[in-house]
Image: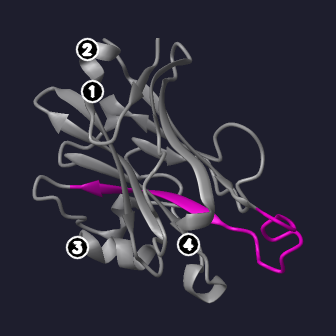
Amino acid sequence: MSINLKKGQRISLVKEAPGLKRVLLGLGWDVAESKGGILGLFSGQQDYDLDSSVLCLDAQGKLKNRSNLIYFGNLRHSSGAITHLGDNLTGAGEGDDEQIVVDLPQMPADFHKLIFVVNIYKSQQRNQDFSHVNNAFVRLVNLETNQEIAQYNLSGGSYDGMTGMIMAELYREGDDWQMQAVGEGIQVQGLQEIERMYS
């Protein structure tokens, strides 16, 4: 049975899914409707293009080099441990909008934390922020059994002016991996700025 996580809550993947090897992180969101219809359809505002990324950090919490940033321009880490399944340009449709597969046994030894973030593409040029993004969630699925381990739904709170979101973290705890629900809004102009936060 899937665990509904609250902000800041942590779970042990060893305890919740013994023998877990390959996990899928599904991220999803909806764009709020305006009086004239869906934003971007009648209001003259462009579609929201949200991009998910993974930053692979070392023991000091640093991104060593750009090859350890997995995003729409670098879909697969050279180790084979992390694969981004592609960019959804509008967030349309049910279920996950973007998916990332993590192969825990393939994880390089110097990766101690994975930060899962979502940011609005060209947010400044399009004057867009997370105040119009609803029902954002991240979920963790065991790919071998196709069972959902945990889900974190972002609800409440004000995200006015926020153009990025730190959704969740996976991090090492001895021989175990832990997941933490984060849900922290950030003000960034693009992925490069998120990259600099951890450099």
The amino acid beneath tag 2 is Lys
Residue holding disc 4: 129
Query: CB atoms at circles 4 and 2 under 8 Å apart?
Result: no
Query: Of 4 and 176, which appears nearest the observer?
Result: 4
182 drawn magenta: no
Residue holding disc 2: 15
51 drawn magenta: yes
Disc 4, SS: loop
Could you tell me which quadrant the C terminus lies in? bottom left
Q: Residue furthest front?
A: 35
The amino acid beneath tag 3 is Ser
From which residue to which does the magenta span run?
Answer: 34-57
Which disc is residue 20 wearing?
Answer: none
Q: CA distance from mark 4 to mark 2?
A: 37 Å
Image position, residue 77 (x, y; %) = 42, 52
Which disc is residue 199 wearing?
Answer: 3
Residue holding disc 1: 11
Left or right placement of residue 14 versus residue 84 in this view: left
Query: Which mark sits nearer the N-terminus, 4 or 3?
Result: 4
Disc 2, SS: helix
